[in-house]
Image: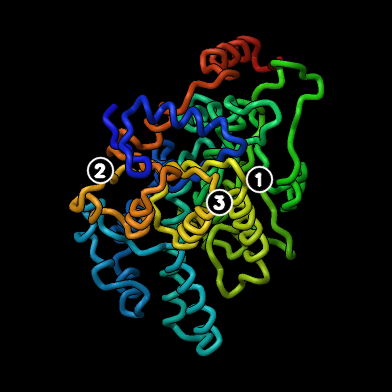
Amino acid sequence: MSIVCVRGDSALDEQDLRAHLAAMLRLENISVLLGAGASVAAGGLTVLQLWKNFLREYPQSARRFSREGFINTEDTELANFEGDNTREVPNIEILLDSLEIARIDWQRRKPTSRNLKVFEKDVDLLLQCVVKAAILNEQSWRSAPKFDQLPHHVKLLQRLVGARQPGQASPWIFTTNYDLSVEWAAESVGVHTHTGFVGIHNRTFSPQSFDLGYRNVNARGEARFGCNDIYLAKLHGSLTWESSDNEYKELSASEFWPRLKGIIDGAQPVSSSMMVFPRAAKYLQTVGFLSGELFRRFSDFLAKPQSCIILIGYSFGDDHINRLIRSALLNPTLQVVAFLPEFSGTQEDQLVQLKPEVRRLLSLNSPRITFVGGGENVYFNNMVDLLPEPMLYDLKEQEFKERIRAASGGDHAE
């Protein structure tokens, strides 16, 4: 594997990087921030791919957004993006935010306007593209995927929980993705996931559940090594969340699938109750509580002593998250490891290709900040192989369990 790695002002080779990651996973607190790039291997789309699909399928909608001043004129031409994966795309969440505010104001001023109906249809088409980008695999919504259908997510989770020492906190997964890849991967190998929602038949958001954990009351000595649960904070929402009667609910994938199927087929509009998209005009009444609590947990984690956050598939395109990470560097024991495929070195001609936020972090020359680049070599599916092997979990053992279940018709528990 050919990688480029810089820690502070020092270059690391692959062996040094592996040693550094092994040390990071043994810190008191460990977390991972997953961006859109982490779901590509599972069938998801990057923001660039999402925007290309929107331009390809609904060019007239994009041009109308441009005429109204929501996006730049050059952002409406598919030809500008084809073959250029480094081109900046509109921030989809900020765009949706602006569109939502405009829609509400338009309804107030001209509720019967024919142009308003066209505008609302254009917004819904963009939302459909966002939903399609996060579906991953339609079959998984009907029956939960097995561990070998999300091998890279499974490997990440197993290596995180397998590195925990006795008494250490369970790992955190923070993600900007709407899909269910983390939940499905955890479920397929028996890792419990704390999402902030509690209940069996009526799962509602209760942030206090993040302060709870699991432990084996019978474990003694070496058996106490590792953990069997993770905390998952979906910072931008989830496809299976909805707001109803001032409550925030998490539904099962199979329960929510008929609604999603209607959306991606164009048979029904995206429901305003779906807790996926930013709704600035309703922030205080709805999304504010849930989103604010999740971001508070993110900020609180970054302030903990002896902590590390690993960034995977995150392109530094979210200014809110960037500010939180930057300010968290005041924590003298926080370590940041960022896997960024476009990072190729610290020469002037190499730095100019990077986002301003990345250049700002690199300019600090801090030994607490590590950037790892190398194109496809540091994509999510390759990056997880750099993490140290878990001590408690083994994929061959999992395969054996699967064969036992299959042979017994699935009637026997593990």
Identify the mark nearer the N-term, 3 or 1: 1
Residue 230, labelled with which disc?
A: none
**Residues under labels 3 and 1: Cα distance?**
26 Å
Q: Which residue in the structure is indicated by mark 2?
A: 344
Q: Position of residue 41 (x, y in %)?
A: 40, 36
Choose top left, top right, bottom left or bottom right for residue 12: top left
Q: Is residue 241 visible?
A: no
User: Where 412 falls versus 314 (above or below)?
Assistant: above
Q: Position of residue 69 (x, y in %)?
A: 34, 79
Q: Position of residue 106 (x, y in %)?
A: 50, 84
Q: Residues within 10 Å of mark 3 (few under 14, many from 20)?
A: some
User: Residue at point 60% right, 37% down?
Assistant: 171
Q: Amino acid at mark 1?
A: Thr
Q: Amino acid at mark 3?
A: Asn
The nearer-to-camera label among 3 and 1 is 3
The nearer-to-camera label among 2 and 3 is 3
Q: Amino acid at mark 2?
A: Ser
Q: Is residue 356 visible?
A: yes
Quadrant location of the C terminus in the rendered image:
top right
Task: Please give the count of numbered marks on the rendered protein.
Answer: 3
User: Where 197 falls versus 137 (above or below)?
Assistant: below
User: Residue at point 29% right, 72% down?
Assistant: 72
Q: Which residue in the structure is indicated by mark 1?
A: 195
Between 397 and 163, which is closer to the camera in this rendering? 163
User: Residue at point 50% right, 36% down?
Assistant: 139
User: Where 119 falls versus 34 (above or below)?
Assistant: below
Q: Which residue in the structure is indicated by mark 3?
A: 331
Quadrant location of the N terminus in the rendered image:
top left
